[in-house]
Amino acid sequence: MTTFKDLNLTKQLINALSDIGFENPTPIQEKAFPVIMSGKDTVGIAQTGTGKTFAYLLPILRQLTYSEQRQPRVLIVVPTRELVLQVVDEVAKLSTYMQARCTGVYGGGNINIQKQKVYDGIDILVATPGRLIDLTLSRTLQFNSIQKLVIDEVDEMLNLGFRAQLIKILDILPEKRQNLMFSATLNEDVELMIDNYFKKPEYVELISRGTPLEKIIQHAYQVPNFYTKVNLLEYLLQTENAFSKVLLFVKNKKIADEIYKSLEGEFSEDIGVIHSNKSQPQRFSAVKKFDEGTHRLLIATDVIARGLDLKDVTHVINFDMPSKEASAYIHRIGRTGRADKTGIAISFITKKDAAMQKEIETLMKKKLVILDMPEAVEISENLTQDEKPVTRDKSLKKLPSTTQFSGGGAFHEKKDKNKKVNLGGKRRQENLRRIAEKNARTKPF
Ligand code: AMP
């Protein structure tokens, strides 16, 4: 196993790492180090929790020379105040035995104190985009000595609407600089930014270990709706002790929060949630609790789970099936199991997922084993707002009363047509009938 000593670090950095108790670089640290040291523009695809902060700080500090100049030589741009504080803290830990003047600036903090710190002289500046621009506009801060730029969690930054500010910053930085970017995902927006501002970047990616398919038992339940899925999940957690480290995939953050709310009473001590609306410390704490076994269940969206190195996951549950790409299913289930053990993947499949299920089975050349719904699981009749059939009452009202209630062909034609598209079963038919009756009473003709 690689140790930090193998990384051509300085004695000062090795000693600092040893004080913190870190001996071995994480995969992203090991991979990114030589690339960043070579001076190339670098794009690291890694999620929070993988050690990505040290992955860029170690080579930066390794190359930082002593200087008395005031304006910063390294600029690290991050999306949130919490992350500013965290990065500053990590720099402080690593630079115990060397001189690295580092300060953090962010919106909401006292700008005069921040100005003073910049004025006193810094080597590394960690900043949120808005405050960074404020400080350059007031001329406290100058960019002409910046040699290295890090944009951390760039996908998050774009999600939060910082695009214009980022571009402004990129445009005023000196041309000759090394660009480093870290992102959990590579989407079109991120790629566009790389194309426009990076020079022949090298990509450093964490390829997930992925248990081979044949070592994963794949089961599925056919489940009609959200609340029945919650009942089934609750049942599995209550009756099966083997479900001790469960990674639960959901399609969006709203559903993640809904599940947490639904299970909170009985399992609040056992569950963590990670999605893009959670702050960095919250996400980190949730991942840590899951990894250490304090939490039994981690609810996650695809985007946020990518790049996380979670060990010994007993079960992956697809609470929602992937909706876009069949390959996402394979990435998800590859998170369960260990090198020498079998993993278990369970999918909750609704009628809407039929096409995706077929696509996945074709991709894997393997069928999912459909299990009978356990009798003890209550099939809920409740529907979430999103599951409720789209109501057509408005269009019904818009029809002229003569057409609706004349008893003539037009009304019956409409009714037959509606039947074909299934308006949501008996209750909806009943509602339609009542509206029709009410209109007939209030609009006599
Ligand atoms: P990050 O992905 O940068 O948010 O890091 C996640 C956590 O992992 C932080 O608390 C780091 O202090 C910790 N960490 C970073 N590098 C290592 C390492 N080589 N060994 C153990 N823990 C680490």
Image (cartoon, grey):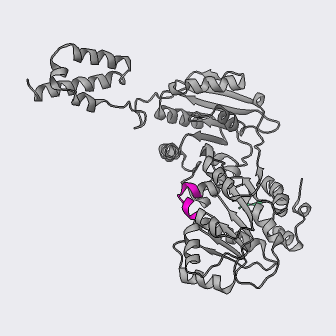
Query: Furthest-left residue in view?
Result: 445
Locate residue 148 relative to residue 442 in the image: left or right: right
Residue drawn at the location 70% of the way across and 49% of the way down: 308
Task: Where is residue 216? Give x, y as percent.
Answer: 73, 30
Q: How many marks?
A: 0
Answer above or below: position of 40 versus 67. Answer: above
Locate residue 233 relative to residue 394 in the image: left or right: right
Dominant SS of magenta comes to helix
Q: Nearer the viewer, residue 51 or 18?
A: 51
Q: Nearer the viewer, residue 186 or 362?
A: 186
Locate residue 329 relative to residue 99 in the image: left or right: left
Task: Where is residue 55? Give x, y as percent.
Answer: 77, 60
Q: Is residue 421 magenta?
A: no
Q: Nearer the viewer, residue 308 or 128?
A: 128
Residue drawn at the location 86% of the way across and 74% of the way down: 12
The quarter of the displayed image where residue 66 is located:
bottom right
Answer above or below: position of 46 versus 215. Answer: below
Task: Where is residue 49? Give x, y as percent.
Answer: 70, 55
Q: Quadrant of ligand 1?
A: bottom right
Answer above or below: position of 325 versus 87. Answer: above
**Is residue 106 visible to us here?**
no
Q: Which residues are magenta?
A: 157-165
Quadrant holding the C terminus: top left
Answer above or below: position of 65 versus 410. Answer: below
Task: Where is residue 22? Give x, y as percent.
Answer: 81, 63
Query: Furthest-top residue in view?
Result: 409
**Is residue 74 visible to us here?**
yes
